[in-house]
Image (tube, coloured by chain):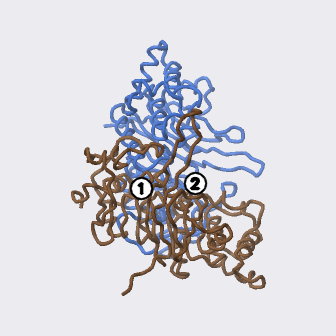
Chain colours: A brown, B blue
């Protein structure tokens, strides 16, 4: 069997943000939101990125669409580097990658009906000929579980879950290959969240979509993913297929993250690892391993030397000097 | 041994009188809290859990909100309808509250130490210096590193987790009997949430206060609370000891909620969902408020409201399935 080509390949991606100088001759402050990460996304899979606020997961998603201009690295879609494209080429490429955000209230224009929104998306990308747009819209509405009559309504007439369905319909309207879901179910109540998760899974199966799922919620991630990336302060600390990660998390941060989640599932008496302190600022990230300030196992080496991602098992990589102790 | 009831909410009804009509946000809620106990009040958005907690200290926006019925007994004494002056004596001293977003509850231009000291001086007639020292001590107790330095900082200089610690320090400064925690960890990351929950548990043991924990997160409830009240459409629909309630939920809604959570330790192909949506608080159905979404609903459920039935001590459910009528109908006698 030949090597499977990734549909999207992110290589050495860096996204820095430059802050205003505090003093006239002072140094420019740099926020290293995403600092040299690489990963591949394969066709038809769901790859999740988890981590806490400020870890760079959302920034990564935005960088892929060039919603922020990445500082360095390459992002290649079907072998073409998105970062070298002109705006015009980029607009064409965005047809293949769509994004759904967390807050369906903020990402829908309140003055447009659903019909206007869908028509606009389809016309910009020129994917559906005018005479077929009507049929396509009805099909889309049914696909996401909304009644076609709702096409004439405005966003405020819908509930949060319904609005997220509209967001999905709009993303699907241009027949994308990849959908980036940025905390797309985080604002929803659990019963509604379950509906949207089921919908995403169903759509993925039916349409052969590839999902990049960005979330802070590990149980949601477990439900939806094939593979998972764990990020901490702009770096990937662990990447593995779902089963391997949930059965044997290796990195101390991943393990602490797992143990911190309150659950109603009984018989899950785990050792509680309570991390000390706050997440450090990405403005001045700690030297060496960025987790060393909170890691209960940190040594002198961790303070000085940055660990590289190494493969510890089949496809399971982690960035920790002492991974052998945690296997 | 007779347990000491610290707070009891009896048939509380808080309604909002708006242009659109009367919104019955809280519609007959009852529960009580023993000394040192933690009760979790859970439910989805709009179920009335936050309005219940705000009603206890009469902090509902009024108008349009008004407590139209019911009693709130603090150590057996009704505090509904007390004049503002007397309520102010209770707030912060007997009953304190912490909220989801500390940034909106803290004064942004006053140092956190000052803010805590102010609360202390309001209730205990301490001189400035002593109040300040106590404020610093409180910051130390809630686990803020170098509290002397932090006390002199303003809220924006602290992280989200630290700000929530400051809120807890302020709330507990006068050793209240009851702490109402309204989604206190919802805005925090899980590792920070774990720290805050640990601190709350620890302080509860040391200070012996009772906690009302309002949240939508069933996981947090199962780790924090002794007992749980599940709310739906302005009412408590199930109540019981935490472990029992999660192991054997009685109400179809509670079961639905638990089943729709993605599991952390288990593979599932598809998640269970609850069909439909919550009824509008302006116009509840005549019968059971959950009937339209309930897979077991019968005609009986749509005719009149079910009562909260006590199944065993402390175990209650508002559902016809557990009533005499249901069985009679089953056997065809009704």
Q: Position of residue A36 (x, y in %)?
A: 44, 58
Dot 2, crowdedness within 10 Å: few (<14), some or many (≥20)?
A: some
Horizontal arrangement in the rendering, residue B312 relative to residue B96 (left or right): left
Dot 1, crowdedness within 10 Å: few (<14), some or many (≥20)?
A: many
Picture quarter with the C terminus of chain A: bottom left
Q: What residue is shown with label 2? A: B45
Q: Position of residue A316 (x, y in %)?
A: 32, 67
Are the residues at dot 2 and dot 1 in contact (C-beta closer than 8 Å)? no
Subunit of mark 2?
Answer: B
Task: Determine whether the residue tagged by mark 1 lies in a helix, strand or loop.
Answer: strand
Residue B333 in view in this figure: no
Residue in the image at 56% along x and 31% along y? B79
Do discs 2 and 1 belong to a common subunit?
no
Subunit of mark 1?
Answer: A
Q: Position of residue A186 (x, y in %)?
A: 53, 58
Q: CA distance from mark 2 to mark 1?
A: 35 Å
Horizontal arrangement in the rendering, residue B5 relative to residue A22 (left or right): left
In which image quadrant can residue A119 be found? Answer: bottom right
Q: What residue is shown with label 1? A: A235
Q: Position of residue A245 (x, y in %)?
A: 34, 65
Residue pushed farthest front?
A25
């Amino acid at each position: 069997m030949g090597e499977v080509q990734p549909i999207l390949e992110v290589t050495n991606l860096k996204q820095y943000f430059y802050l205003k100088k505090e003093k006239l001759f002072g140094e420019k402050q740099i926020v290293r939101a995403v600092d040299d990460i690489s990963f591949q996304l394969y066709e038809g899979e769901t790859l999740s990125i988890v981590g806490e606020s400020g870890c760079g997961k959302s920034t990564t998603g935005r960088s892929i669409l060039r919603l922020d201009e990445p500082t360095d690295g390459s992002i290649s879609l079907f072998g073409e580097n998105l970062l070298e494209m002109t705006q015009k080429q980029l607009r064409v490429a965005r047809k293949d990658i769509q994004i759904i955000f967390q807050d369906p209230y903020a990402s829908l224009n309140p003055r447009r009906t659903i019909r206007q929104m869908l028509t606009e998306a389809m016309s910009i990308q020129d994917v559906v000929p005018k005479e077929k747009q009507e049929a396509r819209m009805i099909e889309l509405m049914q696909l996401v579980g909304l009644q076609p009559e709702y096409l004439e309504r405005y966003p405020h007439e819908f509930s949060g879950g319904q609005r997220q369905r509209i967001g999905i319909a709009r993303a699907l309207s241009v027949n994308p290959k990849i959908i980036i879901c940025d905390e797309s179910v985080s604002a929803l109540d659990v019963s509604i969240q379950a509906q949207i998760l089921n919908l995403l899974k169903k759509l993925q199966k039916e349409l052969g979509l590839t999902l990049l799922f960005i979330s802070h919620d590990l149980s949601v991630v477990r439900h939806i993913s094939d593979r998972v990336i764990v990020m901490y302060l702009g770096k990937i600390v662990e990447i593995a297929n779902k089963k391997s990660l949930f059965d044997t998390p290796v990195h101390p941060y991943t393990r602490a993250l797992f143990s911190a989640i309150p659950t109603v599932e009984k018989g899950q008496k785990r050792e509680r690892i309570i991390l000390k302190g706050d997440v450090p600022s990405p403005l001045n990230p700690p030297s060496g391993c960025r987790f060393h300030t909170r890691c209960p196992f940190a040594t002198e080496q961790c303070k000085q030397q940055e660990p590289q991602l190494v493969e510890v098992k089949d496809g399971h990589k982690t960035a920790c000097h002492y991974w052998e102790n945690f296997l | 041994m007779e347990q000491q009831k610290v707070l009891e909410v009896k048939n509380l009804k808080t309604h909002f009188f708006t242009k659109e009509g009367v919104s019955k946000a809280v519609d007959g809620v009852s529960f009580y809290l023993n000394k040192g106990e933690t009760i979790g009040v859970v439910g989805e958005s709009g179920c009335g859990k936050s309005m219940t907690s705000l009603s206890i200290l009469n902090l509902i926006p009024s108008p349009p909100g008004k407590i139209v019925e019911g009693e709130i007994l603090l150590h057996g004494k009704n505090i509904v309808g007390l004049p503002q002056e007397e309520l102010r004596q209770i707030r912060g001293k007997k009953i304190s509250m912490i909220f989801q977003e500390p940034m909106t509850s803290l004064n942004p231009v006053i140092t956190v130490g000052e803010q805590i000291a102010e609360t202390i001086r309001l209730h205990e007639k301490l001189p400035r210096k002593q109040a300040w020292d106590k404020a610093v001590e409180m910051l130390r107790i809630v686990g803020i590193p170098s509290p002397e330095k932090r006390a002199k900082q303003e809220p924006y200089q602290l992280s989200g987790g630290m700000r929530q610690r400051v809120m807890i320090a302020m709330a507990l400064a006068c050793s209240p009997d009851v702490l109402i925690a309204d989604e206190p960890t919802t805005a925090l990351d899980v590792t920070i949430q774990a720290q805050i929950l640990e601190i709350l548990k620890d302080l509860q043991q040391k200070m012996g206060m009772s906690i009302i924990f309002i949240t939508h997160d069933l996981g947090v409830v199962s780790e924090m609370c002794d007992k749980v009240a599940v709310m739906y459409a302005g009412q408590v629909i199930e109540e019981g000891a935490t472990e029992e309630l999660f192991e054997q939920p009685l109400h179809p809604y509670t079961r639905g909620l638990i089943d729709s959570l993605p599991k952390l330790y288990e593979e599932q192909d598809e998640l269970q969902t609850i069909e439909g949506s919550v009824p509008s608080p302006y116009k509840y159905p005549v019968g059971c408020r959950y009937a339209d979404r309930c897979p077991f609903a019968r005609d009986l459920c749509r005719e009149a409201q079910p009562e909260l039935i006590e199944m065993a001590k402390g175990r209650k459910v508002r559902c016809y399935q557990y009533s005499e009528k249901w069985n009679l109908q089953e056997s065809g006698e009704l």
